[in-house]
Structures are given as C-alpha cells and as structure tokens.
Image (cartoon, grey):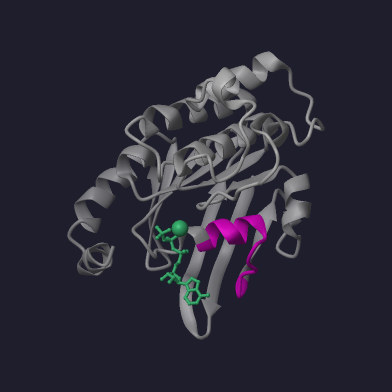
Amino acid sequence: MLCLRGIHYSVNGKRIIEAVNMRFRRGMSYSILGPNGAGKSTLAYILMGVLKPSRGRVFLGETDITDLSITERAKLGISLLWQEPARYEGITVWEYLTLGGKLRVNKEELQRVLELVGLPYELYAHRFVDKSLSGGERKRIELASLLLLKPRYAVLDEPDSGLDITAGELIENVLNYFKETGTTVILITHHEEIAAKTDFAYFLCAGRLIKKGFSREVVEYYKRTCGRCFLAGMMRDEH
Ligand SMILES: Nc1ncnc2c1ncn2[C@@H]1O[C@H](COP(=O)(O)OP(=O)(O)OP(=O)(O)O)[C@@H](O)[C@H]1O
Ligand SMILES: [Mg+2]
C-alpha cells in the first residue's frame, strides 16, 4: 500500500497542499479529481519524489520513502506519466519503448500495447520520438511505455489531456490492462467521466481533500458542488 500521511506543501509562503491523507491499495484504481490549480500535479510530484513535502510523510507499506529520489522510487515500482510528455530526439518508438533493447518484450506484446493506445505498430514502431509526432501521439507512446513497464504503482497525470474523443475508451483499456498486471493506478484528471472509470476517487480542491470514496459517489458530489463553487468557477473562467 502507498500512503500519503499528513502532507503539507508550501512554496514562498503560499499553501498549495494542506493536511492531505490518501491510501492506495495494491491492484485497485484511484482517481484524484479536482479543478485546475487544485494541487493534483503537486501531489503526483510528492508521490514520485520530484517534490518533498513541507510536512508529512510518504509510505510504501511500512517503509518511509519520503527522502527517496525519483530513481529510487522507480526501482521500487512507482512510475509517473507526466502531464507534459517529453521528447527524445534521435531514438525510435521501438527503442524508446524497449529502453534501447534493455526491456525484454517480444513483437506481439509491443504490437498489443501500441494497438491498445490506438497506434498501429506498422505505422509507429519505427517513427522517431521527435517533433514530427503530435502531442496526442506522444502522450499515447508514453502511456504505452508505462504499460510495458508494468509498475507496481502508475501515477497518471491527466492521461486524457490532449487526446481526442477516443480518450475515454483508451483510459478504459489502460485500466483493464493494469488490472491484469496487478498495477495500482492513480489517475489524475478534471474530467468526472474519466474519474468514474476507476474503483475509488479523491476529490481535491484548493489543496484540500474534500471527499473520498467509491468513484461514482465522489463524482456525483463533485458534479453537485464543484460546478456551483464560486472559486472553481473563477478558476475555470481564467482558462
Ligand atoms: N513554484 C510555485 N510557485 C507558486 N505557486 C505554485 C508553484 N507551484 C505550483 N504552484 C501553484 O500551486 C497550485 C497547484 O498547482 P498544480 O500544478 O499542482 O495544480 P493542478 O491541480 O495539477 O492543476 P491543473 O489541473 O491545471 O494541472 C496552483 O495554483 C499553482 O499555481
Ligand atoms: Mg496538473
């Protein structure tokens, strides 16, 4: 089980995360739902070791991993899909997905995973991971890479952003695949229809945990309250 215990995060005196407790059990899928600026990516970075909390601890089972680096956490099986995918000039999709041949995957598996993210193997395996790929294609390739890694915990920061109308189906495929591999999914989103696809959900707003529970219940609450909230409305108008 991966746990956030009493997490606070402030920067330049600004409180970004306040007293957040979350638990992620093995093999379950969770969403962290909240409007722009709620603190979702900040929490993802705290889970991954990109940021250190100002207060509070991160636990993996009984082990306190708060002081471990990104690399050390990756070795423990915690992986992150970044909100903004990076480009890797000069290497092909095949090389990228197999970590330059280090990850032992056969062609069938590579084909299955690429098709699962909506990219036909023949058209994409030998393309370069550079500017010639669209933002949506890069996001799909990053997702494919996480699927092949089969981490114990996959933190997905807005996997649906920048994707077209097929995003819902793609997320369902990803969740089903990770159910098979026993991976715990932590899916960050501000779309309630995406959050509804996970087993459990946390609703975060202005850095505070507002509600937790079965996804359907949390989504219902989010739809009822968040749409009417003055603060969230203001935040949405800015975008
Ligand atoms: N270094 C920083 N200095 C000042 N404010 C920051 C800093 N980093 C983050 N913030 C603020 O913290 C809040 C939470 O940011 P975060 O990126 O975690 O939000 P988010 O929920 O991921 O939003 P989005 O849905 O837009 O991705 C935002 O208001 C952001 O402006
Ligand atoms: Mg974010």
**Quarter of the N terminus within the rendering:** top right
Residue at 47 percent across and 25 percent down: it is: 118
Q: Could you tell me residue 170's position as x and y percent?
A: 44, 29
**Quarter of the C terminus within the rendering:** bottom left
Q: Could you tell me residue 197's position as x and y percent?
A: 39, 33
What residue occupies the far right of the structure in this picture? Answer: 102
Residue at 78 percent across and 46 percent down: it is: 75
Q: Could you tell me residue 99's position as x and y percent?
A: 75, 36
**Ligand 2 position by quadrant:** bottom left
Residue at 61 percent across and 75 percent down: it is: 54
Horizontal side of residue 140 vs 222, given as left or right: right
Horizontal side of residue 210 vs 58, given as left or right: left
Q: Could you tell me residue 12's position as x and y percent?
A: 53, 85
Relative depth, front residue between 109 and 132 = 132
With respect to residue 171, does 45 lie above or below? below
Magenta extent: 42-55
Residue at 47 percent across and 44 percent down: it is: 135
Relative depth, front residue between 205 and 101 = 101
With respect to residue 207, does 143 lie above or below? above
Which picture quadrant has residue 177?
A: top right
Relative depth, front residue between 89 and 188 = 89
Horizontal side of residue 73 vs 158, given as left or right: right
Q: How many marks?
A: 0
